[in-house]
Amino acid sequence: MRDKRFKGAAEKNRSFTSTIDKILKTHEPGSNLKRVSVSPESLIKMVKAGRIDYTIEYPIVAGYYDKKQENPGSIASIPISEMEPFAYVYMNCTRNEWGKKVIERWNEALHKIKPTREYRQITEIGHTDEKELKFIRKYYDEFLNAK
């Protein structure tokens, strides 16, 4: 982010996990990273076109958008070393009885399906990088035990 030879762009107003958000808060001012109001797909297109040198995105998302473009496989994901092995994703509903019930039912269903072979296959399905798959498999049991 400090190397002026590179230009980066990331989605404006997006949280990238608390760890990455803290790094960005500390290092983004005066860096080569700009926040822009565009979609992840547009950012991947900008990388592929050489308009920017990097963006911040989950590898599975970057890979998905890369495959939709001409010349798939022309970008690479570089892990952020400070990143936790897995990130939590949250679901939001209206703050009322209906929303509370939806979230309770979602949590019940998720706890039932998380230990299944089918769910594990779904978590791996879009990951084509062998290093990434090894990483996922290494931490999968820890993920299962997370609340």
Image (tube, rainbow, N blue to C red):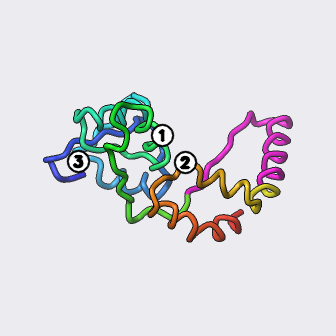
Quadrant containing the C terminus is bottom right
> Residue at the location (44% across, 63% down)?
131
Q: 113 above or below 67?
A: below
- Amino acid at pointer 3: Ser
- Residue in the picture at 76% in, 36% down: 95
What is the C-alpha distance between the residues marked 1 and 2?
Answer: 7 Å
Would you place residue 1 above or below residue 11 in this image?
below
Residue on which the image places disc 1? 64
Question: Dot 1: what SS?
Answer: helix
Q: Residue at x 20, y 53 (%)?
A: 2
Q: Residues within 10 Å of mark 2 (few under 14, many from 20)?
A: some
Whether residues under marks 1 and 3 lie with C-beta atoms below 8 angstroms apart, the answer is no
Q: Residue 94 in the image: state x and y as whole percent.
A: 74, 33
Neighbours of disc 3 within 10 Å: few (<14), some (14-19), many (20+): some
Instruction: Give yes or no for residue 91 being in the magenta stretch.
Output: yes
Looking at the picture, tell me which residue is in the foreground, 50 or 118. Answer: 118
Name the residue furthest front: 71
Q: Position of residue 24 (x, y in %)?
A: 36, 51
The answer to whether the residue labelled 3 contacts the one labelled 2, judged by CB atoms less than 8 Å apart, is: no
Looking at the image, is mark 3 or mark 2 earlier in the sequence? 3
Residue sitting nearer the eye, 5 or 98: 5
**Which numbered disc covers residue 95?**
none
Question: Mark 2 highlights which residue?
Answer: 126
Residues under labels 1 and 3: Cα distance? 28 Å
Secondary structure of the residue carrying numbered label 2: loop
The picture quadrant where one finds residue 93 is: top right
- Contact check, label 1 and label 2, Cβ < 8 Å: yes
- Residue type, label 1: Tyr
**Element assignment for label 3:** loop
Name the residue that disc number 3 marks: 31
